[in-house]
Image (cartoon, grey):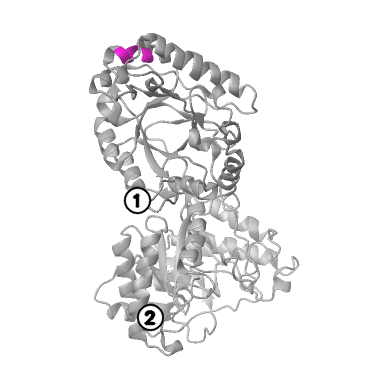
């Protein structure tokens, strides 16, 4: 289904402009704010670097809080196509409802680079219906610009710059004649001719610019601007915008407010109060995104956002210390791409920080716990600062209560874990007050888990913890009597009753549950109890949903791939393990 813009927008360049736009929206009748979020500017050393603005996320919230629709725009240079595509992902991840690519002379001749941008964006889950092309109005006269190439990505609409700046401020051409040339002869006529030769014709959403620039800046008066609105009205657009809030004379506000828009026909209407449908954020999947510089491991292909449709969370370890050939900056960049791609599709990240993230100077490496806990907190602070507004939750440590987990966990007494958890949680919260902190995935029996959490909490003078992660392996849901390779330790309903009653004031997250087989050849054998495992999965989700929906708000299945202890919903060749695969998505997509 197409997505149709309906309303009036105003462009902003700075954070101050966003504030001005939200304040002036009502007298102007503006419904959408188009905020600049990125560019590839030249720095003092002469190097151009792609930048996503620090204020972009807060600007989106400010626009939404004002009851307006937030749209993002990026000044394109196509110097670093993949990095510029990542700006699109960041904008969607921050909650912008659409992204506009401002494509001007800086992109001349860069058709190959444009194709790289298109391929990267689409392969990382960007919805082309929400991306727009801001072009010159006389598009036929700019054949060197990659407008045709970008048409595959920019299917949301065309936003030609139908500005007054194409005439000098001292021109003798009257406003009505200027408007006829720019709006009728260029913007609309050339739109028809240009897109008639392409397979897809986007919607038309002109952008007006009520000012002259040369030889000096001069804002249009109401009498000068009215002919432009008259010419535009003849085409009955459902949406138009004005560049920019700082170049609009206040005398134009009543004219803009009084402009009658065309009626949208069909599609989803993007107007105030509209948002893209949100993914449910109740159920997740465990992943193992090993960086490519780790040749000793079998590669774990990450699922695409399309494959994860309906999944609300992805959980994985930030593996930095296990990669001696990668710098921290390279690790942050690698995992950042994963986080942003999923976040743009509405999938949140629960990132695990533990010894695989920061090896440090612990007792295992001629060090001690006091030094390690200080350095670990500093490390967590740096990670949270880098991923502020991007990573939804952090789990500190994993299965630290497991005294027999050599290779998969490092055991820590409650006293030691408290000294790790508290400063790390505080550091994360100080850097990102919206990030959740999860107590680290305890894996014992129900009462043992409660005791471990209580003992740890008693040793902390603060409790900046949002949830407790638990791994109830071997806890059987009702109706399931036997699963090979899964020792039965008890009933899931009894386990959840004990932990929710024993920890009544904190949400319980099931951060791992599944059927580890470990033997890949058995795990890949479709005759090896796949039907029973599928039924077990359904029963787990049904029991949590029916009995503990409020107290256990998040559940992660372990795992996506059989390369993770033979526990996957896909095999080692990345083929779906039916009926396990179908049972998982039936459960997560059926959540209301």
- The image quarter containing residue 69 is top left
The reply to whether residue 80 is visible in this rendering is: yes
Task: Please determine whether, in this image, residue 233 is positioned above or below residue 408.
Answer: above
Q: Which residue is mark 1?
A: 54
Closer-to-camera residue (259/518)? 259
Closer to us: 108 or 463: 108
Q: Position of residue 246 (x, y in %)?
A: 28, 31
Q: Residues within 10 Å of mark 2 (few under 14, many from 20)?
A: some
Magenta segment, which residues?
224-229
Badge 2 element: helix
Image quadrant assignment for residue 263 = top left
Please tell me whether residue 507 belongs to the stretch shown in magenta.
no
Residue 345 visible at all? no
Q: Which residue is mark 2?
A: 452
Which residue lies at the image location 25% right of the left edge and 30% below the top edge?
A: 24
Of all residues, the one furthest to the bottom in this rendering is 366
Residue 253 to residue 268: above or below: above
């Amino acid at each position: 289904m197409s997505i149709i813009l309906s309303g009036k927008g105003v462009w902003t360049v700075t954070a101050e402009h966003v504030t001005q736009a939200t304040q002036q929206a009502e007298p102007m009748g503006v419904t959408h704010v188009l905020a600049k979020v990125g560019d590839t500017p030249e720095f003092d050393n002469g190097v151009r670097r792609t930048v996503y603005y620090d204020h972009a996320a807060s600007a989106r919230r400010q626009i939404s809080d004002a009851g307006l629709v937030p749209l993002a725009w990026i000044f394109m240079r196509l110097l670093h196509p993949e990095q510029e595509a990542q700006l699109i992902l960041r904008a969607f991840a921050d909650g912008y409802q659409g992204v506009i690519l401002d494509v001007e002379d800086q992109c001349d001749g860069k058709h190959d680079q444009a194709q790289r941008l298109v391929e990267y964006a689409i392969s990382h889950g960007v919805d082309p219906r929400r991306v727009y092309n801001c072009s010159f109005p006389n598009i036929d006269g700019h054949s060197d610009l990659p407008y045709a190439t970008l048409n595959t990505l920019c299917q949301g609409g065309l936003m030609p710059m139908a500005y007054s700046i194409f005439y000098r401020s001292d021109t003798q051409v009257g406003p009505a004649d200027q408007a006829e040339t720019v709006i009728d002869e260029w913007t609309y006529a050339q739109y028809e001719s240009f897109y008639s030769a392409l397979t897809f014709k986007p919607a038309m959403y002109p952008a007006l610019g009520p000012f002259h620039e040369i030889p000096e800046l001069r804002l249009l008066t109401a009498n000068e601007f009215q002919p432009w609105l008259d010419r535009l009205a003849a085409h009955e657009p459902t949406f138009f915008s004005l560049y920019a809030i700082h170049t609009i004379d206040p005398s134009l506000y009543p004219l803009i407010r009084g402009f009658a828009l065309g009626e949208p026909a069909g599609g989803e209407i993007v107007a105030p109060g509209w948002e893209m449908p949100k993914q449910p954020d109740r159920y997740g999947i465990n992943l193992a995104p090993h960086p490519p510089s780790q040749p000793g491991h079998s590669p774990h292909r990450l699922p695409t956002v399309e494959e994860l449709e309906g999944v609300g969370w992805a959980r994985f370890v930030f593996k930095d210390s296990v990669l001696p050939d990668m710098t921290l900056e390279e690790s942050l960049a690698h995992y950042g791409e994963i986080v942003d791609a999923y976040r743009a599709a509405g999938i949140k990240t629960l990132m695990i920080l533990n010894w695989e993230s920061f090896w440090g100077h612990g007792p295992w490496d001629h060090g001690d716990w006091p030094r390690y806990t200080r350095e670990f907190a500093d490390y967590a602070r740096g990670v949270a600062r880098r991923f502020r507004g991007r990573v939804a939750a952090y789990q500190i440590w994993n299965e630290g209560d497991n005294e027999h987990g050599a290779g998969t966990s490092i055991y820590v007494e409650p006293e030691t874990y408290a000294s790790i958890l508290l400063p790390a949680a505080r550091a994360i919260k100080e850097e990102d007050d919206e990030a959740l902190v999860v107590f680290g995935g305890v894996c014992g029996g129900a009462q043992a888990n409660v005791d471990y959490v209580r003992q740890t909490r008693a040793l902390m003078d603060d409790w900046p913890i949002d949830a407790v992660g638990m791994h109830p392996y071997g806890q059987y849901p009702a109706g399931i009597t036997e699963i090979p390779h899964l020792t039965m330790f008890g009933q899931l309903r009894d386990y959840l009753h004990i932990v929710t009653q024993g920890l009544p004031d904190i949400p319980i997250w099931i951060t791992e549950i599944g059927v580890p087989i470990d033997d890949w050849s058995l795990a890949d054998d479709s005759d090896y109890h796949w039907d029973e495992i599928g039924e077990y999965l359904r029963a787990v989700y049904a029991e949590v949903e029916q009995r503990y929906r409020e107290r256990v708000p998040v559940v992660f299945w372990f795992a996506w791939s059989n390369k993770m202890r033979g526990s996957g919903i896909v095999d080692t060749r990345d083929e779906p393990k039916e009926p396990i695969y179908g049972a998982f998505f039936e459960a997560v997509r059926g959540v209301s």
